[in-house]
Amino acid sequence: MERLLLQEKKHFELIEELYTELKGIKPLVHAEPPGFETYREGLREAVRLEREAIRQYRDTYLLTPSPRVRDVFFLAMSDGIDQLAALFLLGREWDQ
């Protein structure tokens, strides 16, 4: 789980840096409190959000001609696929 959090932090920092580079200002970020109460619900929500993120990363990757932007979103997309697999494995361990 710690590895997943470190990857997410890395993605956030890369995308924040890219945004700042392109727009000239840091993005305004609003973190929402978790909307789950159990570990199982948290895993389901994490899977849903990761699948959504992977689709967004893929779409951004495919739509931009910038190699720098493509590299950032390709990394986030490929790490997201690994994270999704890890979340599924955590879910299986919880079921046993």
Image (cartoon, helix red, strand yellow):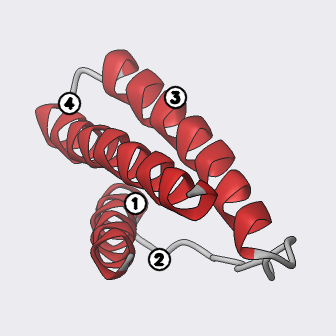
Task: Please give the residue where the numbered disc 1 appears in the rendered image.
Answer: 19
Q: How many angstroms separate mark 3 from mark 1 (CA)?
A: 19 Å
Q: Callout 1 environment at 10 Å: few (<14), some (14 to 19), or many (20+)?
A: some
Choose the circle earlier in sequence order: 3 or 1. 1
Q: Residue at x 80, y 82 (%)?
A: 33
Q: Callout 3 environment at 10 Å: few (<14), some (14 to 19), or many (20+)?
A: few
Q: Residue at x 12, y 32 (%)?
A: 67
Amino acid type of the residue tagged 2 in the rendering: Lys
Choose the circle earlier in sequence order: 3 or 4. 3
Q: Secondary structure at mark 3?
A: helix
Q: Are marks 1 and 4 in contact (CB under 8 Å)?
A: no
Task: Please give the residue where the numbered disc 4 appears in the rendered image.
Answer: 66
Amino acid type of the residue tagged 3 in the rendering: Arg
Left or right? Give the position of 57 relative to 49. left
Q: Secondary structure at mark 1?
A: helix
Question: Which quarter of the picture shows residue 48?
Answer: top right
Q: Are marks 2 and 1 in contact (CB under 8 Å)?
A: yes
**The one of 79 and 95 positioned closer to us in this rendering:** 95
Task: Please give the residue where the numbered disc 3 appears in the rendered image.
Answer: 55
**The one of 75 and 37 positioned closer to us in this rendering:** 37
Task: Please give the residue where the numbered disc 2 appears in the rendered image.
Answer: 26
